[in-house]
Image (spheres, helix red, strand yellow):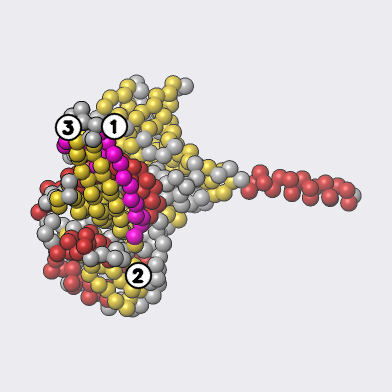
Amino acid sequence: MNRIILLFVLILISSEPYFSDEIQKKAIVSYLKGSVKIIKISEKTPIPAKLGMTLFSGDKIGTGEDSKIELKLEDGANFRIGENSSVVIEELKQEKGTDKSTLRIMFGRIWMNLKKTQDSNPSDARIITPKVTAAVKGTTYRADVAEDGEAVLNVYDGSVTVEKDGKEEEVRKYEKIASKDLHKVKFTDAEEAKDNWVGWNKNRDKIRIMVVFTEKKNGQLSLIPMSEVIFAEELLKNYTYSVVDQTALNQIRENEKLKAALTEDRDGRKAAAAGLEFGADLMITGQVDASARLTEAGYGMYTGISDMSVRVVKCDTAEIVTAKNSQKRIADSLEQGAFNNAVRKVSQMIVESINNDLLKSWKKENVKGASLYVSLYNVTFNRVEAIRKAIAGIPGAKEAVQISFTGERALLTVNFAGDSLSLAEKIAELNIFDLRLEVVGVTLNRIEIEVK
């Protein structure tokens, strides 16, 4: 008898690694607007979705007219569901070190952003529609599924493998495919400019970056640095970033905060202040010393030399994300070509090296002290102060300070004795004259509010 018990115990012990290989994961509601219903796997009756709600495998999501929801996964990925949609979370787990997620779309619109940093776990993400299955390892794409089950997938970054009846097609960046015949065609951003759903998702995905350099060309200070343009072009090769246009930057180049960010900044605070004033999420400041001179050997060739130092600052926290320095030499038959190519090559090297640091910093949402950030959208300047005072008067809120205002968007920082969800609930209860504050997004350290 004892031998039987011992054998049973040994079987359990030897089986333990098999069971521990699978970990059930969760998704958190991080943005919510309109009417969204959830049917939990253990229930039959729909319940209203709430910010901060936790969803697991088997849960169903239904959205109404003019409604949308964003779910953030533990691996940093997220997906968003548009209006009049029905989606089931079929699978959400980690298995043998791989993050696995499967969504079944009955009908409607879904946007996937599976961008990962280099130290993220491998991923196996799938969506299932009535007609096709799409598998990805890490990319950005959307799927529109009609009520008859036919689907169209648009890929914005990376690639997606679409399968139907045993046939597979790989869909790459700026390609779309229809489930009816698996026919691929190219598309452009201009074609989608009128689609509000696409525009909203793109804006939400992208990290808005401001690039401001001090440049010396052949020892002379440049009034308008060409290196800014070249560096921005290299950044824009990554779908995740949007960069403040240099035409707009030239109009504010003499701004005192901008000049201070380049000349007086030691701890990143001045760069952060300048970035926030102009609506940036990250500020990249740098010094470039570049030249193009005839080679000693002659033959009409020029040698371009570029020495570049950059620093990346997160605007809402003044955290210095990373700092890099590199130098490159390039030969060219033209003086300007040698200069530009040297700057471009060193820009490519630095962008490649800081890219993972940028994504990692952006996905990391750690609460630092008791400071929370409140973003106000669709707000006029004269209303910001009334909202700030009302938030400062919430029990537990020690201080509320306006950091920036630009383009009907304001950012406040609030010292609060509690978490972001608790503060969001209190803000939603505020009565401020004729204003209605609709809390639409909550993360660990940020609350998003649309002002009605």
| Residue at the far left in the pictured view | 251
Residue 19 point in image, percent of width and height: 65, 46
Q: Is residue 217 above or below residue 334?
A: below
Residue on which disc 1 sits: 174
Q: Earlier in the sequence, mark 3 or mark 1?
A: 1
The image quadrant of residue 402 is: bottom left
- Name the residue located 40 percent from the left edge and 56 percent from the top edge: 364
Residue type at the position of mark 3: Leu
Residue 252 covered by magenta stretch: no
Q: CA distance from mark 3 to mark 1?
A: 34 Å
Residue range corresponding to the magenta coloring: 320-343
In the rendered structure, find residue 86 and report the number of the disc placed on it: none
Residue 348 point in image, percent of width and height: 31, 41
Quick one: SS at disc 2?
strand
Q: Depth check: 335 or 22 in front?
A: 335
Residue 366 point in image, percent of width and height: 41, 62
Residue on which disc 3 sits: 334
Q: CA distance from mark 2 to mark 1?
A: 40 Å
- Which circle, 3 or 1, is nearer the viewer? 3
Residue type at the position of mark 1: Tyr
